[in-house]
Image: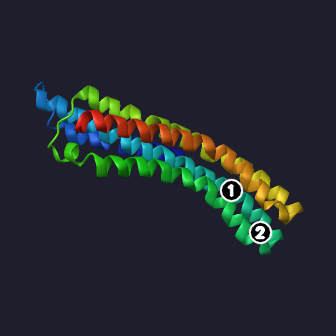
Amino acid sequence: MRTSTSLALTLGLLAPLTAFAQNAGTTMAGSIQWGLAFAFLGVATATFLSCIGSIIGVSLTGQAGAGLLTEKPELAGKVITLMVLPGSQGLYGMVISLLFIFNYGAVINGDVVISLSQGITLFVVSLPVAFTCLTSAPYQAKVCAAGMHMLAKDDKLAGRVITMAALVETYALLGFLISFFMLNSFKAGLLG
């Protein structure tokens, strides 16, 4: 399972590079294509890593929730709410990718060309959201899973559990905001 996930991730990350490598040569056009390839690799990384964090987080929370629901099925709404929380990090990475696709249409269409260094810059812009979401979702899930133990004892503590879990997500939100602002400020300099 872990090997197939690693292989799928590697192939997904390398797919844009192989598509553009066919046209790459020693000409300036080749370096422009590599710049675009790195830009696409960056936004793909933002989505892949954020979603992997959410997959792990939702899975961990679901495992804890399944145990609680066997004992107290009336808590299904609260358990599902806690399961949704680690899933939000995948959305942050996807939003960064969508912002690139919608705001950098001129680059994607070839109307505005970017150099290799600009492509690498766009790759680096997506790293804060990718890594903060990859890391925060599983840790948020651990807080949610521990919170399910609290709910097993007293189901009126759901608000406190959600607050504790939201504190972990704050750092994913910070990573998202840094990527968001860097992407927008780079756009202003590149596309004017």
- Is residue 151 shown above or below 72? above
The answer to whether residue 32 is seen in the rendering is yes
Instruction: Find the distance from the CA under tag 2 to the CA under tag 1.
Output: 12 Å
> What count of labels does the image hold?
2
Say what amino acid the circle numbered 1 marks.
Answer: Thr
Residue extending farthest to the left is 27
Say what amino acid the circle numbered 2 marks.
Answer: Leu
- Residue drawn at x 48%, y 37% as measured from the top left: 178
- Residue drawn at x 83%, y 56% as measured from the top left: 149
- Is residue 62 shown above or below 69? above
Q: Nearer the viewer, residue 113 or 58?
A: 113
- Residue drawn at x 77%, y 59% as measured from the top left: 159
- Position of 105 with respect to 164 (left or right) is left
**Which mark is drawn over residue 95?**
none
- Is residue 28 shown above or below 12? above
Q: Nearer the viewer, residue 27 or 12?
A: 27
Q: Residues within 10 Å of mark 1 (few under 14, many from 20)?
A: many
Q: Residues within 10 Å of mark 2 (few under 14, many from 20)?
A: some
**For mark 2, what is the residue?**
69
- Position of 165 with respect to 35 (left or right) is right
Image spot of residue 2 (x, y percent): 53, 45
Image spot of residue 145 (x, y percent): 74, 53
- Position of 109 with respect to 126 (left or right) is left
Image spot of residue 154 (x, y percent): 88, 63
| Quarter residue 77 falls in | bottom right
Residue extending farthest to the right is 153
Mark 2 or mark 1: name the one nearer the start of the chain. Answer: 1
The answer to whether residue 14 is seen in the rendering is no
Q: Secondary structure at mark 1?
A: helix
Q: Nearer the viewer, residue 101 or 131?
A: 101
**For mark 1, what is the residue?**
61
- Residue drawn at x 73%, y 52% as measured from the top left: 163
